[in-house]
């Protein structure tokens, strides 16, 4: 398999993750200036030769989303104009992913717009993790390698022992496939919480499909921001007799509303990844590293090897 020299660079959204990825594969983090002019405009300068190189730019488009997205686009353009052979945008978290369809009149499909912008800027391929919906891969006219955080969660959860039966629960219908894969792999039962969203920050959990009385429940979801879905589901599960409720969430972007909701104690623990910077706020939040997973994916892409083995798990 042919291998070209790889270069890894990082924007400012999650530099600690980029540094950890580089340490995990024994590659230095490339030198680049990524800063702002006094008027707020982003400025990028790549401080080393990348002509003919295989370039990877690591940037989560987490809050401030627009700023970090613009940084990524400018870094891609800078690499393209510096004659990089191939440019892979590594997005541990893909912002705007929830705007993936027209669910109301006269609204955009912003996830597709962002895909167009990345391609127009000069990205050759995309490496992403736990996209909000699978069809986002089809928004790109370039190759997309889609990773799952589930192997990291499974490794962590398998080290725990419980005397009570485990039930894996999806907090909404859209997450049933993910929950079913978790339940299959962990030999657990499966249940679903039917919900109704009343606003962007408020969710009304309506009913539980499945039996949770006397069981430990693991809620699985791809992203939480206000924790409305998770806490509403957890509250209903406890009313149905669940002994404990934990949540495994790939991307945890907690705002003030989420912190207050989690302080209620209705969720015993939130397990998440460092796809975005996570502040625990003194809450029972466990942050798992995806650096090794992303690092191995970068090496495999660089050597034109298969990425599939990194997430070959039953149900996925």
Image (spheres, rainbow, N blue to C red):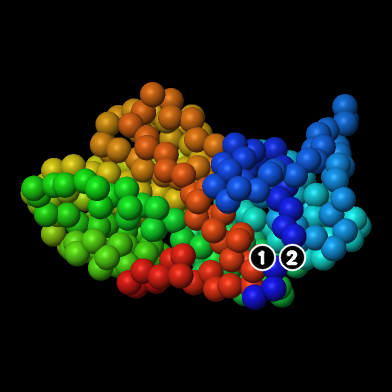
Vertical comparison of 294 with 180: above or below? above
Residue drawn at x 27%, y 31% is: 265
Disc number placed over residue 35 in the picture, else none: none
| Residue 143, image x, y percentages | 66, 73
Kind of element beneath mark 2: loop
Q: Is residue 127 visible?
A: yes
Indicate the quadrant containing the N terminus: top left, top right, bottom left or bottom right: bottom right
Give yes or no for contact between labels 1 and 2 (Cβ–Cβ under 8 Å): yes
Residue drawn at x 91%, y 57% is: 81
Indicate the quadrant containing the C terminus: top left, top right, bottom left or bottom right: bottom left
Nearer the observer, 171 or 217: 217
- Res 220 → quadrant: bottom left
Residue matched to label 1: 302
| Residue 232, image x, y percentages | 31, 45
Q: Earlier in the sequence, mark 1 or mark 2?
A: 2
Kind of element beneath mark 1: helix
292 vs 113, left or right, is left
Nearer the observer, 145 or 42: 145
Residue drawn at x 36%, y 28% is: 283
- Res 55 → quadrant: bottom right
| Residue 267, image x, y percentages | 28, 38
Residue drawn at x 30%, y 30% is: 264
Label 1 – label 2 distance at C-alpha: 7 Å
Crowding at dot 2, Cα within 10 Å, few <14 / some 14-19 / many 20+, comes out as some
Find the residue positioned furthest to the top. Answer: 282
Residue matched to label 2: 4
Q: Is residue 14 visible?
A: no
243 vs 28, left or right, is left
């Amino acid at each position: 398999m042919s291998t070209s020299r790889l270069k890894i660079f990082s924007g400012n959204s999650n530099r600690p993750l980029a540094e950890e990825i580089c340490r995990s594969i024994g590659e230095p983090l490339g030198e680049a200036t990524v800063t702002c002019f006094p008027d707020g405009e982003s400025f990028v300068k790549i401080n080393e030769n990348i002509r003919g190189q295989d370039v990877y730019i690591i940037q989560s488009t987490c809050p401030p989303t627009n700023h970090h997205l613009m940084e990524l686009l400018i870094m891609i353009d800078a690499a393209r104009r510096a004659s990089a052979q191939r440019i892979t945008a590594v997005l541990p978290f893909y912002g705007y992913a929830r705007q993936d369809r027209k669910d109301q009149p006269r609204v955009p499909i912003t996830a597709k717009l962002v895909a167009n912008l990345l391609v127009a800027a000069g990205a050759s391929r995309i490496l992403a993790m736990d996209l909000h919906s699978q069809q986002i891969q089809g928004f790109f006219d370039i190759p997309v390698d889609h990773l799952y955080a589930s192997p990291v969660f499974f490794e962590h959860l398998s080290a725990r022992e419980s005397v009570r039966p485990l039930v894996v629960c999806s907090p909404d219908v859209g997450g049933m496939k993910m929950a079913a894969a978790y339940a299959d792999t962990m030999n657990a039962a499966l249940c679903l919480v039917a919900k109704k969203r009343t606003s962007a920050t408020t969710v009304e959990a309506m009913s539980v499909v499945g039996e949770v009385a006397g069981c430990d429940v693991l809620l699985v979801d791809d992203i939480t921001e206000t924790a409305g879905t998770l806490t509403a589901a957890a509250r209903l599960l406890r009313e149905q007799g669940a002994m404990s409720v934990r949540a495994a969430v790939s991307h945890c972007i907690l705002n003030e509303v989420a912190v207050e909701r989690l302080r209620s104690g209705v969720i015993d623990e939130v397990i998440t990844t460092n796809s975005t910077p996570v502040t625990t706020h003194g809450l029972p939040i466990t942050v798992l590293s995806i650096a090794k997973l992303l690092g191995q994916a970068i090496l495999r892409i660089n050597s034109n090897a298969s990425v599939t083995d990194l997430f070959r798990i039953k149900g996925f």
